[in-house]
Amino acid sequence: MSKKIGDVILDVQNISLRFGGVKALTDISFNVKEHEVRAIIGPNGAGKSSMLNCINGVYQPQEGSITFRGKTFKHMNSRQVAEMGIARTFQNLALFKGMSVIDNIMTGRNLRIKSNLFLQALRIGPAQREEEEHREHVERIIDFLEIQAYRKTPVGQLPYGLQKRVDLGRALAMEPQMLLLDEPMAGMNLEEKQDMSRFILDVNDEFGTTIVLIEHDMGVVMDISDRVVVLDYGKKIGDGTPDEVRNNEEVISAYLGTSH
């Protein structure tokens, strides 16, 4: 069964980003379609994380615009981007190591909690009902990610591959329309990579979440992506299906180092 990829929901136009005199990104344009898995690849220092940081409001590019679902933003912070429906995981895990798995994933619900802090603290009336609903949602994510056995375990005690899964769970708790994954397989062994690939495809399939991912493992990228954009030294050198990118001379030389 082939999945249905929809219209463009994220349109990145002519993004340039500089830090002082250093150009991190130069005139980058690409788009992401609803329900696709879109990979951003490139050698180290290509500007991949900088691009993700522009999309989720961490960096403000000097030139260009980003449009998400018809709304163009030039200067938006991470919280505003999250409220629009874009969530993200991080390369270096930003989890609360002393807190349990369930409490870490609950932090992803913060944007959706309506009752005030006072009622939340007392857990009375609407706040209690709301917390129960959020917990139910989090329990569904825990089941989905197959980490029921670790619900109450402090995250810092889990092996790395499972910590990455908790990080994914926290992002999913926001119920994002688009999920930005920053090197979700970094530091994983083969089995952990296979598990994470499966979860990414399941999120895309079962929740209908659009996925943008940065990843170094070319095998993984080619297996799970619908389209791939390639950066090198902050410039775009390729864009297309995995097969088109795989056979692109400029991409081959960037990866094999023959162009430098």
Image: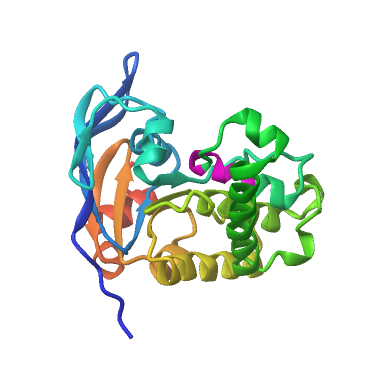
Residue ranking furthest to the top = 20
What colour scheme governs how the chains and residues are painted in the rendered image of this protein? rainbow
In the picture, measured across the screen, residue 148 lies left or right of residue 20, that is: right
Residue at x 28% of width, y 70% of height: 243
Q: Position of residue 116 (x, y in %)?
A: 57, 31
Residue 164 is situated, as x and y percent measured from the top left of the image, at 63, 53
Q: Which residues are magenta?
A: 106-112
Q: What is the residue that sits farthest to the bottom in this orientation?
A: 1
Res 73 → quadrant: top left
- Please tell me which residue lies in front, 184 or 238: 184
Q: From the image, give the main secondary structure of the stretch colored magenta.
A: helix
Decide: is 221 above or below 114.
below
- Front residue of 121 and 125: 125
Residue at image point 39% right, 39% down = 83
Q: Is residue 52 visible?
A: no
Q: Is residue 131 left or right of residue 255?
A: right
The location of residue 74, given as percent across then percent down, is 24, 27
Does residue 107 show up magenta in the picture? yes
Asked if residue 37 lies left or right of residue 185, the reply is left
* Quarter containing the C terminus: top left
Is residue 110 visible in the rendered image? The answer is yes
Considering only vertical position in the picture, is 18 above or below 221?
above
| Residue 198 percent location from the top left of the image | 53, 71
Quadrant into which the N terminus falls: bottom left
The image quadrant of residue 209 is bottom left
- The structure residue drawn at horizontal position 22% and vertical position 65%, both measured from the top left corner, is 6
